[in-house]
Amino acid sequence: MARSPDRLRNSSRRATRMKSESRRPLLSEERWLEAVENRAVHVGVVGMGYVGLPLMRTFCAAGFCCTGFDVDSAKVAKLNAGRSYIKHIPSSLIKQVIRNGLFTATDDPASLKACDAILVCVPTPLTESRDPDMRFVENTTHLIADHLRRGQLIVLESTTYPGTTRELVKPILESTGLKAETDFYLAFSPEREDPGREDYTTESIPKVVGGHGPGSLKIALALYDAAVDKTVPVSSCEVAEACKILENVYRSVNIAMINELKVLFDRIGIDVWEVIEAASTKPFGFQAFYPGPGLGGHCIPIDPFYLTWKARQYGMTTRFIELAGEINTLMPEYVIAKLAEALNTKRKAIRGSKILVLGLAYKKNIDDIRESPSIEIIERLQERGAKVDYNDPHVPRTPKQRKHDLGMRSKRLSEKMLGSYNCVLIATDHAAYDYDWIVRHARLVLDTRNATANVKTGRKRIVKA
Ligand SMILES: NC(=O)c1ccc[n+]([C@@H]2O[C@H](COP(=O)([O-])OP(=O)(O)OC[C@H]3O[C@@H](n4cnc5c(N)ncnc54)[C@H](O)[C@@H]3O)[C@@H](O)[C@H]2O)c1
C-alpha cells in the first residue's frame, strides 16, 4: 500500500532535524542503525528514471531526505522545478517533497559525498552484439568512487548478471584504497518495479537484499526495512542478482511458450485466449501467461541475455533463454503475416494499405515505449509500403530513441478516421480505449491482445493475431 500524503507531510519535520545530524559519517553499525531509526540517513538515488523516481518517493515518504542524482541535466531541471516526466509519478508529489525539504535533484556528482546511502538505478541495456552494456553501471561507480567516504552504504539496484557487485562494482570502489565491509558497506537489492501496476507499489513489493558481508547486509536491511513493508534477506549479492534474473527469465520463457501455442492453436482453429481462461480455473499448478505482439520494456527482452553472457564464462549455454528470445522476437513478423492474410481477404496488399496502430507503449496504461513491439511493427509495415499512423493516449508523439526515430504524432480518434483505414491494429490494450466503438467504426480489426473479447457487435470484422 502507498504511504499517505500525511506521512510525507510529517516527514518534513524530521527532515530539518536530519540535516544537522547526518553530517557526521556513519562509521559504526550501531550509529548506522540509530541514524536509520532517527531518519538521519541522507539517501542518494542515482538515476532518476522509471525506477529511481518511485524509489526516491518511497524513501521521502518514510521520512528520509533524498538527493536524486542524474547525468541528464534536463531531467534534473524539471525535477527541481517540481515537474515529473513519468506518468504515474504526479508533479504534485515532486512539488510536495521539495516543499518539505525532503528532496533535491542534482547533476553534480560531488553532492554524492553528502549521502550516507547511495542507491544506484541506472540503465543496464544490451550492446549491438547483445552482450551486457555495463557502461552506465561502470560510469556511475567511478563517479561514486571519486567521492566515496568511510561509512557510506552503496547499493546496486540495476538488473544485472550474478557477480556484478563483487566483480565490477567492488574493485572500482576499492581502487580508492577503502575496503568493502571494513570502510564502506556494499549490497545488491534488485528493483522489482512494475510501472502502471496499481495493486503494488515500491513500498509493498518485498525487497530482496544481499550484502557483500554481514555488516553490509545488516545495514542495507535496516535502511530498506524503514521504507518498505517487507525485506527478504539472502546470503549474498550473487543470490540477489540471480533472483531478479530468474524472475525475468521465468516471464520470458512462459510468454514464449504461450506465444508458440498461440500460433499452433490458431492453425488448428482454437482460440488460445479461451484455452487460457479455461486452464486458469485449475486452482493449483497453473499460472496464466498471455500471448502478444512481442516482448517490450526495459526488462524482459533484455535481462535474460545477461545470464546467457555469464553462462558462456562457465562454458554453458542457456537454451531456454535463447529459444524464448527466438520465439518472442518472431512475434511482430507473425502479426504482420496475419495482417497480410486479413487484408488479402479484402483483396488488398500491405503495400498501399492504410493501417492504424492502436497503442505504442509496450504494455497497457503506461507511456513507456522502450523495446515496444509496436515500433517494430510500424517500421516493418512502412518498409513494405503501408501508410501507417498510430494512436496512443499515453504517447502524444514518438520520442527519439537510441535505435528508432519514427517522428510521428498520435492521431486523434474519430468515427470517420477509424473508417478511413484498411485495418486498425490493436497492439496495446490500453484501458482508455472503447473497443465496442472502435470495432463498430473500423473496417477490419487485427487484435493482438484479445482486447475485443467482450465486443458484441461486428465480431466478423475482428481477426486475432
Ligand atoms: N523500468 C522498469 O520497469 C524496471 C523494473 C525493474 C528493474 N529495472 C531496472 O532498473 C534499472 C533502471 O531502469 P529504468 O527503467 O529506471 O531506466 P531509466 O532509463 O528510466 O532511468 C535511468 C536513469 O539513469 C540516468 N543515468 C544514466 N547514467 C547515469 C550515471 N552515470 N549517473 C547518474 N544517472 C545516470 C539516466 O539519465 C536515466 O534518467 C535497469 O537496470 C532496469 O533493468 C527497471
Image (spheres, rainbow, N blue to C red):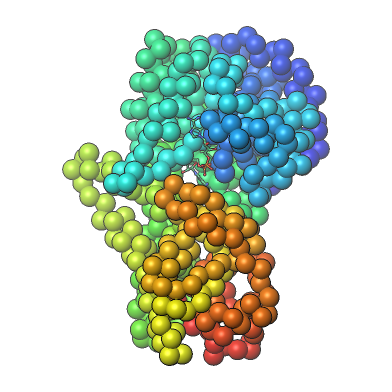
Q: Is residue 2 above or below residue 39?
A: below
Nearest the viewer among 277 and 68 is 68
Q: Quadrant of residue 166?
A: top left
Residue depicted at 40% across the width and 62% down the height: 254
Position above or below: 259 against 219: below
- Answer left or right for 226 relative to 234: right
Quarter the C terminus occupies:
bottom left
Q: Residue at x 63, y 77 (%)?
A: 417
Q: Residue at x 67, y 45 (%)?
A: 89
Residue at (77% x, 35% y) in the render: 96
Q: Is residue 58 left or right of residue 99?
A: left
Asked whether the viewer can see residue 278, the reply is no
Residue 15 position in % (x across, y down): 74, 23
In the image, farthest residue toward the left: 315
Q: Quadrant of residue 396?
A: bottom right
User: From where the camera sits, is residue 417 visible?
Assistant: yes
- Relative to 40, does residue 414 appear above or below in the rendering? below
Q: Position of residue 381 (x, y in %)?
A: 42, 70
Which one is nearer the viewer's eye here, 349 or 77?
Answer: 349
Percent position of residue 5, x then y: 78, 40
Between 35 and 400, the residue placed more toward the observer is 400
Give the side of residue 59 with respect to residue 306, left or right: right
Which is more toward the observer, 371 or 41? 371
The number of numbered badges drawn on the structure is 0
Q: Position of residue 321 (x, y in %)?
A: 31, 55
